[in-house]
Image: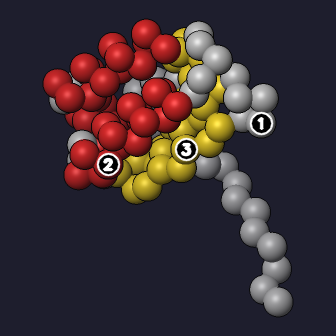
């Protein structure tokens, strides 16, 4: 992780599917996010993406701090969900700090 980093972080987690059907993985990630993660202190929102080739699912999530994210991960519901995820996908986590954001000009 980023032990000395203070401030917000973005997680970009890739799940490479072990099966051809992403439905179960998407349902599991949706369930744990809606029922548990959204309530965690420091959670700033997330988006769930399915690659066009249907071989990867990516979740992008914003957190106010690394510590708050790590506290959520110690929750038993989160750990149980991760064990289920590992049955259907290979988990490739990534944590980033935002260094620049680009937006279209106001119209």
Q: Is residue 34 above or below residue 12?
A: below
Q: Quadrant of residue 97?
A: top right
Q: CA–CA distance between discs 3 and 2?
A: 12 Å
* Whether label 1 touches label 3, CB < 8 Å: no
Residue drawn at x 59%, y 13% is: 19
Q: Which mark is residue 52?
A: 1
What is the quadrant of the C terminus in the image?
bottom right
Residue drawn at x 49%, y 14% is: 88
Q: Position of residue 65 (x, y in %)?
A: 37, 45
Residue 100 visible in the snapshot? yes
Residue drawn at x 31%, y 37% is: 32
Q: Crowding at label 2, few (<14), some or many (≥20) Cα neighbours within 10 Å? A: few
Say which residue label 2 marks: 34
Q: CA–CA distance between discs 1 and 2?
A: 24 Å
Q: Position of residue 1 (x, y in %)?
A: 46, 24
Looking at the image, residue 46 sits to the left or right of residue 38; the answer is right
Q: Quadrant of residue 52?
A: top right
Looking at the image, residue 46 sits to the left or right of residue 70; the answer is right
Q: Is residue 91 above or below residue 11?
A: above
Q: Secondary structure at mark 3?
A: strand
Say which residue label 3 marks: 48
């Amino acid at each position: 992780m980023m032990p000395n980093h203070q401030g917000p972080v973005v997680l970009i987690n890739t799940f490479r599917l072990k099966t051809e059907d992403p439905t179960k993985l998407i349902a599991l990630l949706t369930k744990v996010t809606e029922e548990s993660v959204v309530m965690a202190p420091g959670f700033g929102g997330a988006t769930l993406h399915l690659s066009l080739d249907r071989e990867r699912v990516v979740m992008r999530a914003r957190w106010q701090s690394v510590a708050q994210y790590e506290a959520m991960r110690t929750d038993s519901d989160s750990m149980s969900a991760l064990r289920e995820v590992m049955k259907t996908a290979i988990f490739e986590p990534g944590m980033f700090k935002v260094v620049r954001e680009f937006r279209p000009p106001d119209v």
